[in-house]
Image (cartoon, helix red, strand yellow):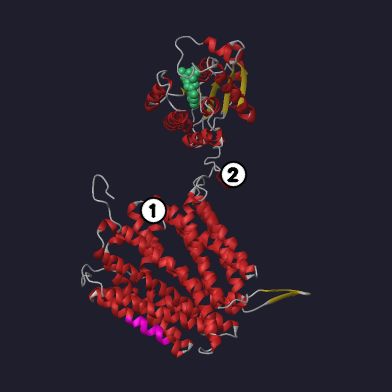
């Protein structure tokens, strides 16, 4: 395939050396996850019998896995820069292979912990060497996609590893049944063999990879703790970032609580290693779903609100997981939990990308990465011992009994923490304070972006005049504006279409009789475009200044003319207009209701594009105007347009007087100083 105008950009995976490195990363990640699963399961199995010991044993593995990176991270980074990177990686892979392979043979809990620490120390060399190699193999402009792929395999292999582990457990059970393995060990041993082989494959892939420069450009890895402290100083002052980070860490902690106690919890529910693999996989499968669909979900809802909501729901689900004692339901809820965490994570990342300024962004991300690690460590470090201290309990009420163990407690606490954090995030960074969350959510569920912006929250007063052709609304709008000005109000009198620079050009297109070929949708969009400009440049600024805005035509004209008149779907017209106006609704709409046969005869001069439509068109328009008014009588005044002009004027004034912001002085009073206070 050729693309005009330049070389077709090749995908970063078309780059053979990078592809090879990426494959090595993928097998290693898969191996790492399998390793975590196998070792936690093995630790649980080796200490079976005593609930407390078992909880501590599983927690010990997690801690052994995370401690080296936190304590020795910076040291290893420095070392990695001194050695040949390719050889470093190969040597590290071979070392990991040997250590992991030894675990099934040594068969002791102590060795699991020592081996875990050894493997993690080796990882400290492998990872920076790999990270430093990527920019050597990939041109600058492809670095971002290389990093994405990197992230994809780091987390994407987790559910695969979980499935593999579940499958190996089944195979393991069969082999154990044949008597060639010690009982209870089939699954974990097999997983460890596969894990060891993954490192070996990586070693071979990297050994045969040419083109890794020996070393150039040192990469520095500051200590995690230093990053955390410095980062917080930097990002803590920004309200949005603070909200995002607290929320994301909360989501992370909730997920961590599940992963941390899953082995023991699943066992209490009567599940074995295969079930553990499934629960573990469910978290990540859910996360993948959430990350994929999250940005598409409830598109109409403010992202910040969805973020807080996702975390709060995650907390609720976690509490449910803790209390339901049914493995199948737990697995299903775990997927939901993962999805919520995934949504929060991806939205948080995107929000940081979108809303945090350039200079802060890099630090925010690295702060997040390091705090996420520390949080995970803390959660796991606290979770298992806490579960162990609490121990096993059974509530008995007559024949009914309910088991509530330390793991249940940890999960409930994790859930409550996530809910608290979610609510904090909701409060902290709400961007639509004037609209209740429930109203926003209901509107979003219906697919409407902007629930009406409640007019009371705008300082000024917004009045629209609507009506058919020749209804006399333009005259009335003018009279009202003069009347209001006479009383000392700051009045902006305006009209649609054509009250802005761009609007004038749109108006010319719209009303030009020669434009007969204009499609109905294009027409609707052009009116909406004019309105968007009108709202942003004229109406909203005036309202926020505290002025009174009187407009000749607004959204209802589009609903009547384009919706009913041109027979477009009224929902669509409503939606594009809600979008165009940001949901701004007038405090009052005055409908001058005139039968078209009367109105049309009042018109002088050549008919424009719309005026020259047939009578039925104008009938439909009138009917729609009346229907709109009938649907929300509190926001409308309908006046009979065939009445004498003065009578209409009086009716309009009477109604407007009721809603004027400040008490209207009687005609005889001095009007100076009665401008509405400028509230802002
Ligand atoms: P205009 O000359 O302003 O006349 P009027 O006094 O009737 O307002 O013309 C506006 C025309 O545009 C009018 O025929 C109605 C039509 N129109 C729509 O079809 N949709 C809209 O959203 C708006 C604002 C106007």
For residue 82, what is the image quadrant? bottom left
Spot occupied by residue 55 in the image (x, y as percentages of width and height):
55, 79
Mark 1 vs mark 2, CA separation in Å: 28 Å
Residue at point 44%, 77% (across, down): 35
> Above or below — where is 138 with respect to 95?
above
Is residue 227 toward the left or the right of residue 83 in the image? Answer: right
Kindly state the secondary structure of the residue where label 2 is placed: helix
Spot occupied by residue 462 in the image (x, y as percentages of width and height):
53, 28
Of callouts 1 and 2, the N-terminal one: 1
Residue at point 39%, 57% (across, down): 235
Residue at point 36%, 68% (across, down): 226
**Labels 1 and 2 touching (C-beta < 8 A):** no
Kindly state the secondary structure of the residue where label 1 is placed: helix
Q: Does any portion of residue 664 appear in the rendered image? A: no
Spot occupied by residue 302 in the image (x, y as percentages of width and height):
50, 47
For residue 598, what is the image quadrant? top right
Range of magenta residues: 94-102
């Amino acid at each position: 395939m050729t693309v005009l105008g330049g070389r077709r950009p090749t995908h970063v995976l078309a780059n053979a050396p990078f592809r090879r490195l990426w494959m090595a990363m993928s097998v290693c990640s898969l191996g790492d996850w399998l390793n975590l699963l196998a070792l936690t399961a093995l630790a649980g199995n080796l200490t079976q019998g005593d609930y407390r010991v078992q909880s501590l044993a599983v927690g010990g593995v997690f801690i052994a896995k995370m401690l080296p990176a936190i304590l020795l991270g910076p040291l290893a980074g420095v070392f990695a820069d001194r050695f040949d990177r390719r050889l470093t990686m190969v040597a590290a892979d071979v070392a990991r292979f040997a250590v992991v392979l030894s675990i099934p043979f040594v068969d002791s809990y102590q060795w699991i912990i020592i081996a875990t620490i050894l493997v993690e120390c080796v990882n400290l060399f492998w990872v920076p060497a790999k990270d430093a190699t990527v920019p050597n193999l990939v041109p600058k402009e492809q670095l971002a996609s290389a990093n994405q792929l990197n992230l994809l395999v780091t987390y994407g292999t987790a559910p695969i590893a979980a499935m593999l582990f579940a499958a190996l457990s089944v195979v393991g059970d069969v082999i154990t049944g044949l008597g060639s393995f010690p009982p209870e060990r089939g699954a974990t041993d097999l997983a460890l063999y596969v894990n060891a082989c993954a490192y070996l494959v990586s070693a071979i892939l990297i050994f045969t990879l040419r083109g890794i420069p020996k070393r150039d450009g040192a990469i520095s890895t500051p200590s995690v703790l230093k990053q955390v402290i410095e980062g917080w100083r930097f990002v803590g002052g920004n309200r949005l970032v603070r909200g995002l980070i607290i929320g994301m860490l909360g989501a992370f902690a909730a997920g961590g609580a599940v992963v941390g106690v899953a082995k023991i919890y699943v066992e209490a529910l009567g599940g074995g290693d295969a079930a553990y693999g499934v629960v573990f996989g469910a978290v990540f499968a859910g996360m993948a779903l959430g990350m994929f669909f999250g940005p598409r979900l409830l598109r109409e809802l403010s992202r910040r609100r969805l973020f807080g909501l996702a975390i709060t729901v995650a907390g609720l689900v976690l509490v449910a997981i803790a209390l339901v004692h049914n493995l199948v339901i737990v697995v299903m809820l775990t997927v939901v939990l993962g999805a919520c965490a995934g949504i929060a994570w991806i939205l948080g990342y995107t929000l940081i990308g979108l809303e945090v300024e350039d200079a802060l962004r890099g630090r925010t991300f690295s702060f997040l990465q390091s705090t996420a690690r520390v949080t995970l460590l803390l959660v796991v470090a606290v979770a298992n011992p806490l579960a162990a201290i609490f121990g096993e309990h059974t509530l008995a009420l007559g024949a009914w009994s309910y088991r509530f163990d330390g793991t249940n407690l940890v999960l409930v606490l994790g859930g409550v923490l996530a809910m608290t954090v979610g609510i904090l995030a909701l409060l902290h960074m709400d961007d639509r304070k004037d609209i209740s969350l429930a109203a926003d959510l209901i509107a979003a569920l219906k697919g409407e972006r902007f629930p009406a912006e409640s007019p009371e929250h705008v300082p000024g007063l917004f009045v629209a005049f609507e009506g058919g052709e020749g209804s006399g609304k333009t005259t009335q709008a003018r009279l009202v504006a003069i009347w209001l000005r006479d009383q000392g109000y700051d009045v902006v009198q305006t009209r649609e279409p054509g009250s802005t620079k761009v609007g004038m050009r749109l108006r010319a297109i719209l009303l030009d009789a020669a434009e007969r070929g204009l499609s109905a949708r294009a027409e609707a969009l052009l009116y909406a475009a004019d309105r968007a400009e009108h709202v942003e440049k004229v109406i909203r600024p005036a309202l926020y200044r505290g002025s009174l805005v009187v407009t000749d035509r607004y959204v209802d004209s589009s609903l009547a003319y384009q919706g009913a008149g041109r027979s477009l779907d009224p929902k669509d017209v409503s939606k594009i207009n809600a979008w165009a106006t940001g949901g701004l609704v007038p405090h009052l709409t005055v409908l001058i209701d005139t039968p078209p046969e009367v109105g049309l005869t009042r018109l002088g001069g050549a008919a424009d594009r719309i005026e020259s439509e047939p009578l039925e068109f104008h009938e439909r328009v009138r009917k729609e105007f009346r229907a709109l008014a009938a649907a929300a009588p509190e926001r409308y005044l309908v006046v009979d347009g065939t009445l004498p002009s003065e009578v209409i004027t009086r009716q309009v004034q009477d109604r407007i007087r009721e809603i004027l912001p400040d008490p209207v002085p009687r005609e005889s009073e001095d009007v100076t100083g009665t401008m509405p206070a400028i509230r802002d």
